Amino acid sequence: MIATTSTAVAKARRRLIPFLFLLYVVSYLDRINVGFAALQMNAALGFSNVTYSFGAGIFFLSYTLLEIPSNVILARVGARRWIARIMISWGLVSAGMMFVRSATAFYVLRFALGAAEAGFFPGIIYVLTRWFPTRDRARAIAGFMTAVVIAGIVGGPVSGVLLSLDGVGGVAGWQWLFLVEGLPAIALGFVVLRVLPEQPSEARWLTSAEQLALTTQLAEEAAVEGSVHSIRGALTSGRMWLLAAVYFTIPVELYALSFWLPQIVKSVSGASDFQVGVLSAIPYAVAAVAMVLVGRHSDRTGERRWHIAVSAAVGGAALALSGFARGVVPAIVLLSLATAGLASMLGPFWALATSFLGGIGAAAGIALVNSVGNVGGFVGPNIVGYVRESTQGFAAGLTIVGAILIAGGLLVLCVSPGHAAKP
């Protein structure tokens, strides 16, 4: 039975993770491409640092408001149909960003993008809990979430190329960027409807014995390890709210970096838009390697909290120091360490958070943690934007954001391990 379960997990990893990874690359790129568009859009439309940072961050307000109901609907109607709906609607809104002409339109479409995408990430995490036993979950989640950093690696150069189309066909480069990068989400939404199995019993690429072994293993874990099985239990669990507070600190740094990285690199290098895109890919490349290695080590040892805490300390300290860097090389090195530390938190964090959940409580609990945490996606970019407007530099804002991430690393040590998995 153990060998059969291991074979089923290995097949699921090969079949599901690359596809879900691709979906998240497209999702994350549509979410952060405003950072590259800002290299041209802000000047073209007369947006100040405050206008830009508020518009970039307002995405997370609608995302947060709708995330829990969206994930509960997903659990009721099925991941395949609901994730397809999410992708098609966000692709349409993302492409529609090319028509922005005023600050008001910018705010409205960014708010609409958050509403359209609400539930995608926690929905995928919920899907992974229905496929991967706890002992394999950090590696699976880290593999899926490398999409965050791969989107940065791919998105930088691609966005730089699209910005260089400025004026082609009478369309600005930033408009080409939104249009071209929004279309893949629409196409992939229809692919999801055809190829995404809801659970092991629906996977034709598993044998009957593998389906039974994996389903049995997951059911046994849910009965023994999942301490929260209902929507009410998830929403009233003190442990889940503490995890939400920890997770809040991650998007603070994640989106402060994502939305401002191109402009930070531009300020220290004076490079062209395309060169900025290439340089901006370096921190994400370093982070991709780090997060997979840390996720694997966390699964191998069964330890979660210290993996999160140490990664937070490295990421937060490096980000704070990066604001004082002079020259391209020191800045890129520190930004790479900051991104690597941040990304390395993700696999162990979600493995820890999902180890306390089961049934419909998993859908609600994951959405709770992600929605409350993603308020940080509004806070982080705005801290950098407002402080930069006041100080005419990035140092103070990046120091504040780095300190918040370090605080999250300390806070996670207060979370009781409970029934977390043993290796």
Image (cartoon, rainbow, N blue to C red):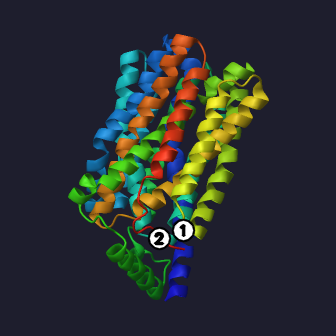
Which callout, 1 or 2, points at the residue further toward the start of the chain?
1
Query: Can residue 16 be seen from the camera position used here?
Result: yes
Above/below status of 15 relative to 240? below
Q: Which mark is residue 421?
A: 2
Q: Quadrant of the C terminus?
A: bottom right
From the top left corner, tell me how far across and down residue 202 is, in percent: 39, 75
Residues at badges 1 and 2 in contact (C-beta under 8 Å)? yes
The number of numbered badges drawn on the structure is 2
Residue at 51% over, 29% down: 34
- Whether residue 172 is visible here, answered yes or no, is no
Q: Amino acid at mark 2?
A: Ala
Q: Position of residue 271 (x, y in %)?
A: 74, 22
Left or right: 52, with 262 as reference point: left
Q: Position of residue 233 (x, y in %)?
A: 24, 59
Residue kind at label 1, given as amino acid type: Gly
Instruction: Tell me residue 55's x, y (percent).
Output: 42, 24
Viewer-side residue, 177 vs 264: 264
Rendered position, 423 above or below 264: below
Q: Quadrant of residue 264?
A: top right
Q: Is 280 on the left or on the right of 243, as rendered?
A: right
